[in-house]
Image: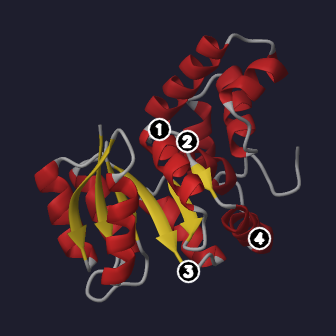
């Protein structure tokens, strides 16, 4: 059962989401919040698996709430659901610890699939959010730093290769085919990479890969 907290200042949207999730096997809404601080408190109290988080809310916004939530319960996933698929929001949301980013115009079936994807530890970005993220790094390309190189130095050559492919958006199966490895071996490399870099999901790996200059927009 995926325990979900809904965080949005629009009561109508929360009600719609609650109705949608209540009819879906394997999902349960364990709390609703109209601002970020309340969302964090509810998620901690209910030990939620996932929070569907808006960005713009009164009081504590969704970005700050995501940071505080990941500090309190790192295993809880955050799926940003917002009207504002802008580059600064996408980048900051991922840096804060969000695992996914979808627009509010998403189809219900895609939202449900997105919840399952993020709850399973995968990253999820809408096409618009992906373009915004790439645009951010294209306009402000990362400059290799000593700190960034130190982080990458902890990885084996194979782990760096797998990290690059994750940042390019390849799935485990795609990476398996590309590198002629078993899916289990690919998953092991990804888990070890996350452990060495101190992150909990693929979305954070993508941010690190771009921030350290390991990959750059347009490279494949």
Residue 135: image tag: 4
Quadrant (top left, top right, bottom left, bottom right) of the C terminus: top right
Q: Quadrant of residue 165?
A: top right
The answer to whether marks 1 and 2 mark residues whose Cβ atoms lie closer than 8 Å is yes
Pointer 4 local density, CA inside 10 Å: few below 14, some 14–19, many at least 20: some
Residue 7, percent from left and from top: 32, 70
Secondary structure, mark 3, is: loop
* Marks 2 and 3, the one that precedes in the sequence: 3
Examine the rendered structure and indicate whether residue 110 appears above or below residue 139: above
Secondary structure, mark 4, is: helix
Residue placed under numbered mark 1 in the picture = 121
Secondary structure, mark 2, is: helix
Residue 58, percent from left and from top: 30, 89
Distance, label 2 to label 4, CA atoms, is 19 Å
Tell which of 31 and 72 is nearer to you. Answer: 31
Distance, label 3 to label 4, CA atoms, is 18 Å
Q: Quadrant of residue 202?
A: top right
* Marks 2 and 4, the one that precedes in the sequence: 4
- Tag in front: 3 or 4: 3
* Marks 1 and 2, the one that precedes in the sequence: 1
Residue placed under numbered mark 3 in the picture = 83
- Tag in front: 2 or 3: 3
Pointer 3 local density, CA inside 10 Å: few below 14, some 14–19, many at least 20: few
Distance, label 2 to label 3, CA atoms, is 23 Å
The answer to whether marks 4 and 1 mark residues whose Cβ atoms lie closer than 8 Å is no
What residue do we see at 49% from left, 68% from top? Answer: 81
Tell which of 113 and 15 is nearer to you. Answer: 15
Tell which of 9 and 145 is nearer to you. Answer: 9
Residue placed under numbered mark 2 in the picture = 202
Drawn side of residue 110 relative to residue 60, left or right:
right
């Amino acid at each position: 059962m995926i325990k979900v907290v809904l965080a949005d200042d629009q009561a109508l949207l929360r009600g719609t989401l609650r109705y949608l999730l209540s009819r879906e096997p394997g999902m349960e809404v364990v709390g609703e919040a109209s601002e970020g601080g309340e969302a964090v408190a509810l998620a901690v109290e209910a030990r939620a698996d996932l929070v569907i988080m808006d960005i713009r809310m009164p009081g504590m916004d969704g970005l700050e709430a995501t940071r505080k939530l990941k500090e309190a319960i790192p295993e809880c996933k955050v799926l940003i659901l917002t009207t504002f698929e802008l580059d600064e929001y996408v980048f900051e949301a991922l840096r804060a610890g969000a695992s996914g980013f979808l627009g509010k115009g998403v189809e219900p079936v895609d939202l449900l699939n997105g919840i399952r994807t993020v709850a399973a530890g995968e990253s999820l970005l809408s096409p618009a959010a992906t373009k915004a993220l790439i645009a951010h790094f294209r306009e402000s390309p990362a400059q290799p730093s000593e700190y960034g190189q130190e982080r990458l130095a902890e990885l084996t050559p194979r782990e760096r290769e797998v990290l690059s492919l994750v940042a390019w958006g390849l799935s485990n199966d795609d990476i398996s085919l590309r590198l002629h490895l078993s899916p289990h071996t690919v998953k092991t490399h990804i888990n070890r990479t996350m452990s060495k870099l101190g992150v909990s999901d693929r979305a954070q790996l993508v941010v690190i890969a771009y921030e350290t200059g390991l990959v750059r927009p347009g490279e494949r």
